[in-house]
Amino acid sequence: MSSKKGQAAMEYLMTYGWAIVALVIVIAALMATGAFNPSYLIAEECTLQPDLSCTSHVLYLDTGGTPTLEFRINNGLGYDIMLTSVKVTSSDNVPYDTSYDVVIPQGTTSDIIMQLDEMLTHKDEVERMKVSLKYISCAPEVNPDCLSSGPEHVVSGRIVAHTAEEDV
């Protein structure tokens, strides 16, 4: 009778042993495909304000390995604006300032391209950046001639992007 107990115990261990082996194989296959890579779980975003929105963005390493950020802003404010400066602060707290003197008409988009020379990033890394845009309102009742002496406004937001390589 004791040999029957041993056989039952062995059958029990073998059944669950094969199930555990199958589970380990499935987990190993998922890890090999990168399904558990946390960078793929982070959603990319470009957020400013609703009427001055960021419609697309990309962070890539150019052929020299320099990180370059490109993003597009859409002027939905209801009046023209004069973009005076763009400041991007990288995740390692390095600020990058670029001066502009560009009028963005109402309802149009403008592309911003910035080289982030000192940013330490590699392909497939996630970067979280703060963005600050300074602009002058060209609203007819405030600054009808769209002069640079008008009141300056600041819009802040953030960009979360995966670093890619430039397509050659």
Image: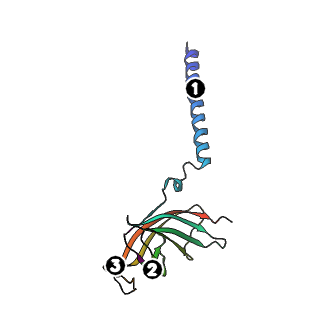
Give the quadrant of the C terminus: bottom right
Q: Looking at the image, is mark 2 or mark 3 earlier in the sequence? A: 2
Disc number lying in front (1 or 2):
2
Q: Amino acid at mark 1?
A: Thr
Residue drawn at 66 percent across, 64 percent down: 167
Residue picked out by circle 3: 140
Tag 1: Cα neighbours inside 10 Å, few (<14), some, or many (≥20)?
few
Which structural element holds mark 2? strand
The residue at the point 61 percent across, 73 percent down is: 66
Tell me the quadrant of the picture where the N terminus can be found: top right
- Front residue of 138/35: it is 138
**Rendered view: 8 above or below 121:** above
Answer whether residue 80 is magenta in the image: yes
Of label 1 and label 3, which has the lower sequence position?
1
For label 2, the crowd category at 10 Å Cα-Cα, with few meaning under 14, some 14 to 19 and many 20 or more, is some
Q: CA distance from mark 2 to mark 3?
A: 22 Å
Amino acid at pointer 3: Pro
Which residue position is annotated with label 2?
A: 85
Mark 1 or mark 3: which is in front?
3
Residue bounds of the magenta highlight: 76-81
Query: Would you name the residue on which mark 1 appears?
Result: 15
| Residue kind at label 2, given as amino acid type | Ser
Q: Foreground mark, 2 or 3?
A: 3
Magenta region, mostly helix, strand or loop? loop
